[in-house]
Amino acid sequence: MNFDDYVSEREARDPAFRDACDRLRPQFEFRKAMIGARLAAGLTQKQLAEKMGTSQAAIARLESGNRLPTVDTLYRLAQILGVDFTITPQEPLTVRPHQAA
């Protein structure tokens, strides 16, 4: 059984687990999207940190959820990774490649 199957099964049988997942889903989706965008850009945590003028440990804290990003950090991540972060009532967070206007 993979992780997604485990979570789906547990959500189906455990209302408290399902509620916790729903509350934490936006943060989880952000971390997953940030890691995916970094990897798609071909960057290590250290390389991303250098481009952002911060430390590898700071990037690790963002990716692990130990630190929530500021708006300035999101802006710099979007610039460096070439993505748009979108938050709507329908979708907690989407990350898409930046589309030139």
Image (tube, helix red, strand yellow):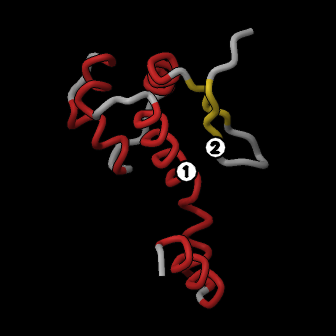
Badge 2 density bin: few <14, some 14–19, many ≥20, Cα 10 Å = some
Q: Secondary structure at mark 2?
A: loop
Q: Earlier in the sequence, mark 2 or mark 1?
A: 1
69 and 76: which is toward the camera: 76
Point out the residue furthest to the bottom here: 13
Tell me the tag on residue 29.
1
State the quadrant of the C terminus.
Answer: top right
Residue drawn at x 66%, y 48% is 92
- Relative to residue 28, is residue 4 depicted above or below? below
- 19 relative to 79 in the view: left or right: right
Between 20 and 31, the residue placed more toward the observer is 31
Residue 13's place in the image compared with 91, above or below, is below
Residue 63: percent from the left, percent from the top? 37, 44
Please tell me how many numbered marks the rendered image carries.
2
Residue, x 67% and y 34% (percent of image)? 86
Disc 2 and disc 1 in contact, CB within 8 angstroms: yes
Q: Residues within 10 Å of mark 1 (few under 14, many from 20)?
A: some
For residue 57, which quarter of the picture?
Answer: top left
Q: Which residue appears at 56% of the width and 77% of the height?
A: 5
Q: Which residue is mark 2?
A: 93
Front in this rendered view, residue 86 or 9? 9
Going by the numbered disc 1, the residue's amino acid type is Glu
Q: Residue at x 47, y 24 (%)?
A: 81
Tell me the amino acid under the disc marked 2. Answer: Leu
In the image, which disc is placed on residue 80?
A: none
Please tell me whether residue 86 is drawn above or below residue 32 in the rendered image: above
Residue 42: x and y, percent?
38, 30
Q: Position of residue 82 (x, y in %)?
A: 53, 21
Q: CA distance from mark 2 to mark 1?
A: 6 Å
Q: Position of residue 37 (x, y in %)?
A: 48, 35
The residue positioned farthest toward the right in the image shown:
90
